[in-house]
C-alpha cells in the first residue's frame, strides 16, 4: 500500500510539473506587432465609449469599413494593462494556454485514458488496470505544447484556443459520459464571437459531430455497422438544436452577420494568403518538426492500436489535418482535435504490450523534477515578462516625438500595430496587420514601395509621405527601398539605430531638421564603407555613439571603418564592444576573426570563426576563412574539412 501511495503521489507531482512546464513554454517575451493595435483599440473604446466601424488609425485607408472582430479582446487587454501592466498580460496568456491544455487533459479521461492515479476512468475498471495512462497523457500534452508553442502569442487567438477546448470538452462529456452541458455552448459563443474571429471553429466542431454522429446512427440502424459510440436519436436532435442556437448567438456581436463573413473575405484574397505568413501551408522547417512528429505518431498509433477508430474521431483528425496542412493558422485546431485521439490509441497500444508497476524511486524522482522546474521558473520567468528587445522601433518613435516630426509616415507592416499604440493620434500609419481594411490595392502598392520598384517615389508622393521609417529586412534582395532612399537626393537620413532607419523628405520646411540631424556620408545599411569619405564617416559614427552608446551596430561599423584604414587594434576594440552589446551577431564575430587573422593572431581568429558558424552555419565565406586560419595555424586536416564545407555551401547556393 505504501508503494502505491508513493506512486500515486509521484504521478500527481508529475502532473503539476508538466503543467508548470507548459505555463513556462507559453510565457515568453512579447514579440508580435498586432497585439498593440488591439491594445490601442481597447483604450479608444474605453475612452470614447464607442466601437469603431471604420478605420481611424491610418492615412491610407481612413474611414474604410473595419470589422474589428477582436474588439472585446482589445478592451480586456487594455483594462488589464492599465491596472497591472504588460507583465500581467503575458501571465494571462500563459494561464489561458495552460488552462486549455488542462481541459484537453480532462478530455483524455473521457476517452478512457486514466489520467488520475487513484481513480479509474469508468466504473468497473480498476485503477491498476489503466494506471499507465497518466504518463501517456502527459507525454501527449507536452508534445502538443511544443507543436503549438510558436503560435502562443499575446493576441485574441489565445481566447479561441481556450473556447474551442471548452467546446470539445462539453461535446465529449455529452458523447461519452452522457453529461448534458450542451446548453452552455450558445452562452459561450456570445463572448467568443466578440473576442476573436476564430469563433467559426466552434461551428466546425459542431458540424463535425452532427455529421459524424448522424452517419454512425444511420449505419447502425440501416446496415448494422458499428462505427463507434452512438448518440440516440433524441440526443442527436438535441445536438442539432444546440448547433442552431450557437449559430444564432454568434450574431450577438457589434458587427452582426458581417463578423461571420470576415474569415471568408480574408481567405478569398490571394495576396493575403501568399504574404501573410500564418495563412501559408506548413513546411518542413525546424519550427514545425513537433507538428510532423505528432501527425506521424497519430497515424502510427491508429494503425498499431488495431482497434476500429471511432468515425467521429476519424472525421476530426482528417478535418484538422487538412486545415492545418493548408494553413499554419489552424495548428491550434489540429492540437485540440488530435491530442485526445492520440492519447487514447497510445493507451490501447501500451496496455497490450507492457504493464508499469510502482517503483520506489518514482516519488523522489518526480519531486526532484518538480523542484527543478519550480527553480527554473523562478529564474526564467522574470526575464520573459517584457517586450522582446530590438524588435520594435521604440528609440525611433521617441526621436519622432521628441523632435515633433509630423506628416504622413511610411512604415513596414510589421511595425504598424506598435506605431498605432505609441503614436496615434499624432501620427497615422501607412499600413498594419489589418489586411481587409487596406484591401489588395494598398497591399500591392505597399509591396512595390518596400521593394523599391520603379514606381516607389510616385507612390510615396501620391500618399504625401513626409517620413519613411524602415527596418533592415531583405538585405539579400538588393536594390531595395533603403538603397533607393539613400541614393535619392529628395530624401535624407536623419536617424538610425540597430534596427531602424528614418528618412525625411528633402523639402524647404525640413531643412532645419536635416541640417541638425542629417547623415550625409554614413549609410548604416551600406554594403561597404566609402573609403574616399572615411574621415567624415568616422565623425558621423562617433557622433552616433555619443547620442547612443548602446548601439552595437555603430560600434561594428566603426570597427569596419578602422579596418578599412588598417587600424586593426582600434577595429578589434570596436568589434569587441559591439559583441558585448550584440553577442549573437555572426557578422561581427566573423569581422573580429578577420581582424585577428590580418594581425596574424590565428589562434584567436579560429574560435571567432567557429562562433560565427554556430550562428550562420550556411556561410561559405566563413567556412573558407576558417580553413585559411587552420592552414596558417598548421592544422591541415581541419583546413581540408572546412575547404570541403565551403565548396559544398557554394554549390548549394
Image (cartoon, helix red, strand yellow):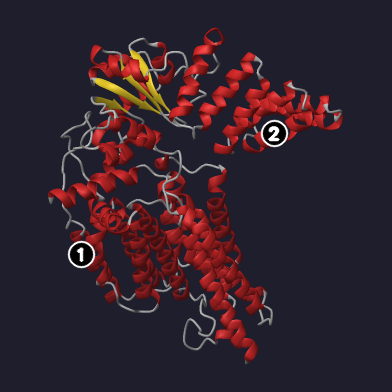
The quadrant the N terminus occupies is bottom right
User: Whole-percent x and y of residue 236?
Assistant: 29, 71
Q: Nearer the viewer, mark 2 or mark 1?
A: 2
Q: Nearer the viewer, residue 490 or 165?
A: 490
> Where 289 sits versus 549, above or below?
below
Q: Nearer the viewer, residue 545 or 103?
A: 545
In the image, is 83 to the left or to the right of 342?
left
> Residue at position x 23%, y 37% from top?
424
The quadrant the C terminus occupies is top right
Label placed on residue 245: 1
Residue on which disc 2 sits? 608
Q: Nearer the viewer, residue 468 or 180?
A: 468
> Where 413 sits versus 40, above or below?
above
In the image, is 79 to the left or to the right of 31?
left
User: Whole-percent x and y of residue 196?
Assistant: 28, 53
> Residue at position x 67%, y 82% from top?
357
In the image, is 420 to the left or to the right of 542?
left
Sequence order check, earlier mark of 2 and 1 = 1
Q: Is residue 331 visible?
A: yes
Label placed on residue 79: none
- Secondary structure at badge 1 equals helix
Rate crowding at label 2 as few (under 14), some (14 to 19) or many (20 or more) other CA atoms within 10 Å: many
Amino acid at each position: 500500500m505504501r508503494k502505491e501511495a508513493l506512486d500515486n503521489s509521484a504521478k500527481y507531482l508529475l502532473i503539476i510539473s508538466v503543467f508548470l512546464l507548459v505555463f513556462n513554454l507559453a510565457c515568453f517575451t512579447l514579440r508580435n506587432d498586432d497585439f498593440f493595435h488591439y491594445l490601442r483599440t481597447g483604450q479608444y473604446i474605453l475612452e470614447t465609449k464607442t466601437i469603431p466601424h471604420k478605420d481611424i488609425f491610418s492615412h491610407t485607408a481612413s474611414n474604410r469599413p473595419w470589422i474589428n472582430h477582436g474588439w472585446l479582446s482589445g478592451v480586456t487587454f487594455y483594462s488589464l494593462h492599465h491596472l497591472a501592466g504588460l507583465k500581467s498580460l503575458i501571465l494571462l496568456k500563459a494561464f489561458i494556454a495552460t488552462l486549455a491544455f488542462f481541459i484537453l487533459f480532462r478530455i483524455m479521461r473521457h476517452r478512457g485514458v486514466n489520467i488520475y492515479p487513484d481513480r479509474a476512468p469508468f466504473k468497473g475498471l480498476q485503477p491498476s488496470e489503466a494506471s499507465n495512462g497518466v504518463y501517456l497523457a502527459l507525454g501527449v500534452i507536452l508534445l502538443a505544447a511544443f507543436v503549438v508553442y510558436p503560435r502562443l502569442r499575446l493576441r485574441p487567438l489565445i481566447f479561441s484556443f481556450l473556447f474551442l477546448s471548452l467546446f470539445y470538452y462539453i461535446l465529449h462529456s455529452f458523447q461519452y459520459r452522457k453529461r448534458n452541458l450542451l446548453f452552455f455552448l450558445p452562452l459561450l459563443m456570445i463572448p467568443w464571437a466578440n473576442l476573436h474571429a476564430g469563433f467559426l471553429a466552434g461551428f466546425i466542431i459542431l458540424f463535425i459531430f452532427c455529421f459524424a454522429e448522424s452517419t454512425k446512427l444511420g449505419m447502425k440502424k440501416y446496415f448494422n455497422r458499428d462505427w463507434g459510440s452512438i448518440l440516440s436519436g433524441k440526443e442527436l436532435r438535441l445536438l442539432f438544436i444546440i448547433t442552431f442556437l450557437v449559430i444564432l448567438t454568434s450574431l450577438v456581436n457589434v458587427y452582426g452577420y458581417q463578423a461571420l463573413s470576415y474569415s471568408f473575405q480574408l481567405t478569398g484574397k490571394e495576396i493575403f494568403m501568399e504574404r501573410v505568413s500564418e495563412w501559408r501551408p506548413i513546411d518542413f522547417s525546424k519550427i514545425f518538426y513537433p507538428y510532423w512528429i505528432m501527425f506521424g505518431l497519430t497515424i502510427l498509433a491508429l494503425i498499431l492500436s488495431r482497434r476500429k477508430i471511432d468515425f467521429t474521431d476519424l472525421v476530426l483528425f482528417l478535418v484538422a489535418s487538412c486545415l492545418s496542412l493548408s494553413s499554419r493558422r489552424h495548428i491550434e485546431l489540429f492540437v485540440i482535435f488530435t491530442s485526445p485521439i492520440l492519447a487514447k490509441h497510445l493507451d490501447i497500444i501500451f496496455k497490450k504490450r507492457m504493464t508499469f508497476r510502482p517503483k520506489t524511486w518514482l516519488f523522489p524522482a518526480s519531486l526532484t523534477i518538480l523542484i527543478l522546474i519550480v527553480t527554473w521558473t523562478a529564474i526564467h520567468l522574470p526575464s520573459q515578462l517584457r517586450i522582446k528587445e530590438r524588435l520594435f522601433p521604440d528609440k525611433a518613435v521617441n526621436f519622432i516625438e521628441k523632435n515633433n516630426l509630423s506628416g504622413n509616415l511610411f512604415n513596414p507592416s510589421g511595425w504598424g500595430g506598435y506605431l498605432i499604440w505609441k503614436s496615434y493620434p499624432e501620427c497615422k500609419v501607412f499600413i498594419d496587420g489589418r489586411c481587409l481594411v487596406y484591401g489588395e490595392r494598398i497591399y500591392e502598392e505597399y509591396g512595390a514601395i518596400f521593394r523599391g520598384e520603379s514606381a516607389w517615389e510616385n507612390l510615396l508622393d501620391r500618399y504625401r509621405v513626409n517620413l519613411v521609417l524602415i527596418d533592415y529586412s531583405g538585405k539579400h534582395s538588393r536594390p531595395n527601398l533603403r538603397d533607393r532612399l539613400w541614393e535619392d537626393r529628395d530624401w535624407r537620413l536623419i536617424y538610425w539605430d540597430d534596427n531602424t532607419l528614418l528618412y525625411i523628405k528633402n523639402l524647404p520646411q525640413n531643412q532645419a531638421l536635416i541640417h541638425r540631424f542629417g547623415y550625409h556620408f554614413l549609410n548604416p545599411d551600406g554594403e561597404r564603407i566609402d573609403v574616399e569619405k572615411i574621415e567624415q564617416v568616422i565623425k558621423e559614427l562617433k557622433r552616433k555613439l555619443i547620442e547612443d552608446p548602446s548601439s552595437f551596430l555603430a560600434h561594428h561599423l566603426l570597427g569596419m571603418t578602422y579596418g578599412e584604414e588598417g587600424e586593426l587594434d582600434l577595429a578589434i576594440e570596436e568589434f569587441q564592444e559591439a559583441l558585448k552589446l550584440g553577442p549573437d551577431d555572426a557578422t561581427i564575430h566573423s569581422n573580429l576573426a578577420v581582424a585577428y587573422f590580418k594581425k596574424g593572431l590565428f589562434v584567436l581568429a579560429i574560435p571567432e570563426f567557429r562562433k560565427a558558424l554556430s550562428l550562420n552555419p550556411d556561410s561559405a565565406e566563413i567556412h573558407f576563412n576558417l580553413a585559411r586560419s587552420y592552414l596558417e595555424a598548421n592544422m591541415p586536416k581541419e583546413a581540408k574539412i572546412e575547404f570541403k564545407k565551403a565548396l559544398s555551401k557554394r554549390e548549394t547556393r
